[in-house]
C-alpha cells in the first residue's frame, strides 16, 4: 500500500474540515454560487461571511477554480 502525499491546496482540506466543521464540498458549493467572481472576491467572501482564515479560504478557492477551470483573475 502506497501512501501518496497530498500537495497543493487539497493538503489543507483535512484541517479545514476539522476546524470549521463542514465538508469541503459545502465550501466549494458556496464558492460556485458566487460565480462569476474573482479569486480574491471569493476569498474575501469566505473570510468575511464565514470566518475562515485567509490561507484556508485561498486553498478552497484555488482548488475550486482549478477544478472548474474558471479564470483566477
Image (tube, rainbow, N blue to C red):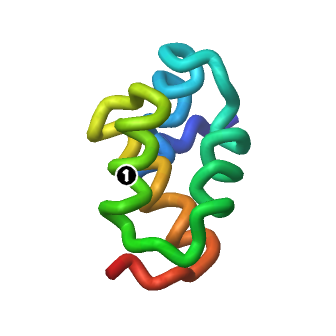
Q: Is residue 69 above or below residue 26?
A: below
Q: Is residue 54 above or below residue 39?
A: above
Q: Is residue 51 above or below residue 46?
A: above
Could one spot residue 7 in this view of the protein?
A: no
Q: Nearer the viewer, residue 9 or 43?
A: 43
Q: Nearer the viewer, residue 31 or 3?
A: 31
Q: Quadrant of the C terminus?
A: bottom left
**Residue 53 in the image, given as x and y percentages of width and height:** 32, 31
- The residue sitting at 47% across, 22% down in the picture is 15
Q: Is residue 70 above or below residue 16?
A: below
- The residue sitting at 58% across, 24% down in the picture is 17
* Residue with the mark numbered 1: 43
Disc 1 is placed on an element classified as helix
Q: Nearer the viewer, residue 41 or 55?
A: 41
Give the quarter of the image for residue 40: bottom left
> Left of 26 or right of it: where is 45?
left
Amino acid at each position: 500500500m502506497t501512501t501518496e502525499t497530498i500537495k497543493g491546496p487539497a493538503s489543507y482540506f483535512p484541517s479545514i474540515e476539522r476546524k470549521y466543521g463542514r465538508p469541503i464540498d459545502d465550501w466549494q458549493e458556496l464558492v460556485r454560487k458566487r460565480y462569476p467572481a474573482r479569486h480574491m472576491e471569493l476569498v474575501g467572501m469566505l473570510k468575511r461571511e464565514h470566518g475562515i482564515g485567509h490561507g484556508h479560504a485561498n486553498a478552497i478557492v484555488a482548488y475550486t477554480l482549478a477544478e472548474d477551470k474558471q479564470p483566477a483573475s
